Image (tube, rainbow, N blue to C red):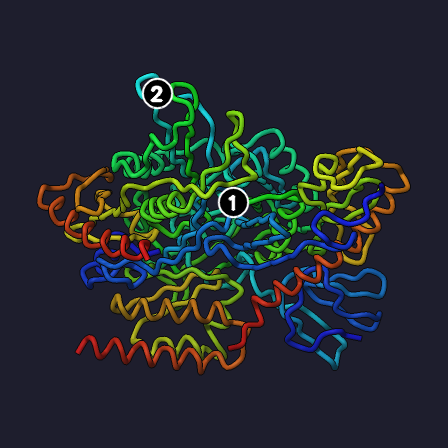
Amino acid sequence: MIKFSEGSVVVPGEAVAEGKEYRIGQGFYRVGEKVFASRLGILRIKEEDNFIYLVPLTGVYNPREGDTVIGKIEDFHSLGWRIDLFCPYSAMLMVREVPGYVPAGELDKVFDIGDLVCVKITKVTNNKMIDVSMNGPGLFKLNEGRIIKISSQKIPRVIGKQGSMVNMLKDKTGCKVIVGKNGLIWTKGEPKTEIIVNEAIKMIEDLSHTSGLTDRVAEMLDKKMEEYNKNKG
Amino acid sequence: MMLKEKFHLLRYLSDGIKSDGVLLDKYRDISYEVNTIKTAEGSCDLKLGNTHVIAGVKFEMGTPYEDTPDEGGIMINVELLPLSSPDYFPGPPTDKAIELSRVIDRGIRESGAVDLKSLCIVEGEQVLTVVVDVCAINDDGNLLDAGALASLIALKNAKIPKIENGKIDYTQLTKDTVKLKELPITITCYKIGEYVFVDPTTYEEKYYDSRLTITTIDDSSIVALQKGGEKAITISDVDKMTDLALTKSKEIRKMIKK
Amino acid sequence: MVYKKRLDGRKFDELRDIEAKVGVIKNADGSAFFKIGNTHAYASVYGPKKLYTRSMQDPKSGIITCKYNMMPFSGAGGRVRPGGNRRSKEISMVTENVFKDLIDLSEYPNAVVEVYIELPQTDAGSRCCGICAASLALADAGIPMKSLVGAIAVGLVDEKVVVDLTYEEEHYPEFAKDKITSEHVADIPLAFIPGSDKIFLLQMDGVISKKSLIEALEVGKKAADKIFDIQVKALKEKYNVEE
């Protein structure tokens, strides 16, 4: 028996289900017949397989292979750069993982300390040694604009179904927007439109668990952009 | 967080706004509650945008200084609690905490706001010292102005405890308040490039060139100053900043008088 | 005369008014405010984040550090000097031990989770209030943990087991309205996880018999369950805001 409906918020220590027939995924543990939540999150039920798992609502980013992330150059040596991924671990970007010519001994001419880069995670070891690459489409240095940091668990909502949310942000504000899986979002437009993007993202973060979010964000964006255009003209 | 941060902050400032979208000469919303702390003789829980501080007043019994035998004492202390920011850590007070404490202290002391003579119990022997501790709960910039304002409001609402046989009975507060002769308001003006503004968030605080803290009283006299930051300011900067501080302090004084 | 009516009129197993709120400190990865009677606590959690002190790193798991502190104006008497003391160090340590076995940081080797507990005002039960707040803040930060933990003080006042003592009850002989039979007051801070008899915090000041101790523990367990319900509600409230 499952004590909550699909989509409910469950908290650590809450008895969520009883019975041996359920298979449990991440975020749950079993004591005897009882299943308890071990994290704050949303309950997902796959009735057909008697399978329950939890989608975390909050938490620091945990690096995964294949993720596109935004990081900050922390340091460099002769073979590459160390990059802060805004999580407990740094990553290595080796010279060979950067397209184009990198003059030996002058790595800082390409990426200097403090620069922000959009990179892809290629490898994560058990003890969290992380390699990243810039070989691939959509991976580059971020030269201008503003960075917004939110909880990495909210990133899927910022992207939306097939990128619907992020595309709406771009279309309505005219800003460029790039979303890193580690919770960093880059945007570039006019200062005032960047602030509107920032506000919209904070709204998505605060209300990420609610339904009808796209409509509400659209409404907010329309209102703010109307104000912006009025003051401009 | 901005890329090539200072450069892009300038982009915002030239557009007339700070990184949070608030106009250069405007403060974020200020709200506060008084005497919420039952264990303090007076307190103020104040929010300035996302910056949150609690100021609490405690009285202590002490002996007066030899040269002022009939005067009590006042002390302001700012605690940058590690709870309030990822940039603060446990340990002894940092330079920042000490500067904040001393600048807030100076404004209140030099304005003569607190009638120190009224804190005398037995001349030459026993006087009260009033201590205001300002604790940062969430630091989103401008702790200085927020802390100074919270201290003043806490002092304004503090009740002197009962004194029996030369000892403070903290369980009983009298109706007597700390008499404030002035309402010194502390405004800090910041400068980045050519732009002057008030009420920075933590972003602007990271990249400012210079700042000037100006405490003024009702008759527009200046009672305390503190210049900070790595770059110099000019006389005309001081002129401009003082004007801004006077305008802002009037608005804030009006708000707390209500 | 045995303790018949509590000084503040509560039933013997009745808790003071509790309020809990999550997400109160924007800078933190997780935060909470917890208030029981006139004892209030803020807690914030930062992390898991990089741990720079190599000697403290654990390559198999992240570690947790807790700091308990009373704000200078939070004591019933005079000002509490900032900077901590032996008492706050000990409380920090026992708080850390409460959470060490409950949280699972195996996915975050070499990292640290920092918990800061700050009390703006106190009236007995401050370490328990701090633990309740910290527990909420850890959950709010998304830290994997077996359970939220409910902490509460129980004790013996004039031969009667009571829950959630106030300052006056902790010093009962001073404040008693009736003649007292026993000078002894026992104050026992406890921490339980819901629906279990596992104890994560147990300390005592005072004098108590074994029989009363076991009775007090049973009472404490029930009180902790009530606190758990309030904590659950506070967490769900943050995420169920539908306008």
Which image quarter holds the N terminus of chain A? bottom right
Q: Amino acid at mark 1?
A: Lys
- For label 1, the residue is C50
Q: Which residue is mark 2?
A: B69
Q: Can residue B87 be seen?
A: no
Disc 2 chain ID: B
- At horizontal 47% and vertical 39% (from top left) the residue drawn is B89
Q: Which chain letter matches label 1? A: C
Q: Is residue B40 above or below residue A29?
A: above
Q: Residue furthest right?
A: C211
Check disc 1: other Cα within 10 Å, few if <14, some if 14-19, many if 20+. Answer: some
Q: Label 2 sits on what residue type? A: Pro
Pick the residue in front: B184 or B14: B184
Residue C164 relative to residue B57: left or right:
right
- Coordinates of residue B8 in the picture (x, y in percent): 25, 57
Q: On the rendered structure, is A96 left or right of C126?
A: left
User: Could you tell me residue B28's position as x and y percent?
Assistant: 32, 59
